[in-house]
Image (cartoon, rainbow, N blue to C red):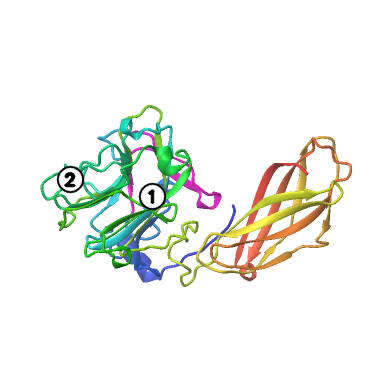
Amino acid sequence: MNGIKRKTLSTAACLLALLGLFSPTAQAETGNVVLWNKLGSDAEIANSEVGPGGQKTAGHFAPGPFANFGQSFVNDVGNSNVFALTFPATSVVSKSKGTIEFWAKLSNFPSNFFDAVTMIFYVPQPNFPIFHWRIGFGSNNGCGGFGFYGTVGVATDGYCNGLVDTATQSGTLDSILGDRSAWHHYAMVWNETGIAQFGGRKLYLYLDGNLVTTQRYHDASPWGAIPDGSRLALAYFYNISGASVAIDNLIVWDDVKTDFSDRFIENPVGCGVGELPELFTSITAKSGTQIERRWTITLSNKSGCIAENTQIDGLALTQTSGAACAPVITSPLSFPLGVGNIQAGAKVSGTTTINFSGCQNSARFKAVIPFSSNNGEVTGSKTLTNQFR
């Protein structure tokens, strides 16, 4: 296990949550987080960190964009009649204004999406699941937009009246994403009265934290209320052999958000009462000679809480292969190795020096690195295998 973070609710709130009468809404800098789901397991999908749980009917799980994010949800069904993962829409998507953000990875899609329409997510009405809140790539969003596009609103005519849509009107997945098979962060923000700081448009897209320049903007609002029973559906796409869409860390806000520099932090709601930081560790560099080999151990804080008095509590090396040898840690002379406080979303490093004299190049080791912070309230350990000097 990499790290531990605790989050508490009052006894009364927990009981109400079990009865379905209470849904925790987290206050944040930009409005409220009304839905936050890590999407890393069946249990996580069914029990959102904030807001209502989801329903999974297909798909599987795979590593997410970062080790500390855990697993992600992957839809490899690609059937227009299968909604692999959904959440209630009317309780989390605000008609008037809001933000939806998430990480996604497209696998085995052709760069030319004119032959491959990919829907990242959308909000379907009952019996008409196409023209509503959604982000995607395609040759036609149904209203004349193509490329990377976003749509908000509820069509009053079954097509485009009552919608606002925007699109890049450009080329290929590679030209938009750079690396179409990599993880990217997506966000869509809307306000039905307009967003003054961006010239008054009602809808904007973000990619990897940057505002997307779109060539098309079409406003056919006002839009109606989201119909009861609508679902927020994730990772939907048409049948493409071998293709899949992975989604991680879905967050919905009830207000417009324009700064996504916090996208690398899994927890969007800051540090609440009773919460502790979540730490992750790795060996990020190795340098020096055989007798003075320096390993840089980095601790990352991917939570909204400050990690106080953080320390590396040890480094244990166990040889797993190669001719027997006995490496000696020469610095620090003893543990713990203090690295200080780690701000939310930041990382710090400490350096150990190891004498590998007598160890052949083929020697391999298991490294165990325990760590702690907040005067022992947060503890964890990282095990790395197949390590060499």
Magenta run includes residue 77: yes
Q: Nearer the viewer, residue 302 or 206?
A: 206
Amino acid type, label 1: Ile
**Side of 325 where 375 appears, left or right:** left
Query: Within 10 Å of the Cα at label 2, are there few (<14), some (14-19), or many (20+) other Cα atoms?
Result: few
User: Splitting the image into 4 quarters, where does residue 158 fall?
Assistant: top left
Which quadrant does the C terminus fall into? top right
Residue at 66 percent across and 56 percent down: it is 298
Residue 76 % position (x, y): 38, 34
Q: Nearer the viewer, residue 79 or 158?
A: 158
| Magenta range | 53-78
Is 87 above or below relative to 142?
A: below
Query: Within 10 Å of the Cα at label 1, are there few (<14), some (14-19), or many (20+) other Cα atoms?
Result: many
Report helix, strand or loop for mark 1: helix
Whether tag 1 and tag 2 are in contact, CB under 8 A, the answer is no
Instruction: Report which residue position mark 1 lands on.
Output: 45
Residue 13 % position (x, y): 36, 68
Is 81 above or below relative to 49?
A: above
**Side of 300 where 34 appears, left or right:** left
Residue 133 is tagged as none
Amino acid type, label 2: Pro
Residue at 36 percent across and 63 percent down: it is 257
Magenta run includes residue 66: yes
Nearer the observer: mark 1 or 2; the answer is 2
**Side of 15 where 334 appears, left or right:** right
Name the residue at the bottom extreme: 273
Residue 18 % position (x, y): 33, 61
Tell me which label, 1 or 2, sits earlier in the chain.
1
Instruction: Report which residue position mark 2 lands on.
Output: 126
